[in-house]
Amino acid sequence: MATIFTKIVNGEIPCYKIAEDDRFFAFLDINPMTKGHTLVIPKTEKDYIFDLDEATYSALMLFAKKVAHAIEKAIPCKRIGVAVIGLEVPHAHVHLIPINQESDMNFKNPKLKLSVEEMNEIAEHIRQKIG
């Protein structure tokens, strides 16, 4: 059975897409910790990120780096925090989270409630910064 992320990649579930190539996909987290919180995934399902072959893992991180630079240009922040937890969806994914302090990375913090318009605006702003 396809994961929710595979359904997003296949267009079966809508998302706020940031970037895509033939192997990877980036989209805004719908329960963001901060504005611009983005998920980066391989299009091929693999439950655990460290089970990816070396070439895919390396390419995923390079794709994430490109997305992180765009987020950093679009969203005022000190850094882009990176987290790989992988328990919530059985599909390898990297969280890119604009942060101004370490506590911004606490997954127990209340999630932001952003409107569809805000999410679309954030996604568009980040997309414009991708080089």
Image (spheres, helix red, strand yellow):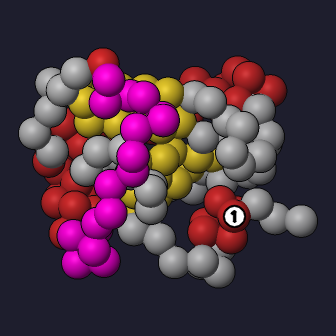
Residue 121 position in % (x across, y down): 19, 69
The residue under the point 24% across, 43% down is: 71
Q: Quadrant of residue 2?
A: bottom right
* Mark 1 surroundings within 10 Å by alpha-carbon count, few (fewer than 14), some (14 through 19), many (20 or more): some
Residue appearing at x 42%, y 28% in the figure: 106
Quarter of the image for residue 64 reads: top left
Q: Is 104 part of what is drawn in magenta? A: yes
Residue 53 visible in image: no
Q: Is residue 28 magenta?
A: no
Quarter-of-image position of residue 1: bottom right
Q: Secondary structure at mark 1?
A: helix
Q: Is residue 76 above or below residue 58?
A: below
101 or 28: nearer the eye?
Answer: 101
Q: Is residue 41 above or below residue 15?
A: above
| Residue denoted by label 1 | 4
**Relative to residue 26, is residue 104 depicted above or below?**
above
68 left or right, relative to 101: right
53 relative position to 102: left or right? right
Residue type beneath disc 1: Ile
Question: Which segment did they paint magenta?
Answer: 103-119
Image x and y of residue 95, in percent: 47, 38
Q: Residue at x 15, y 45 (%)?
A: 75
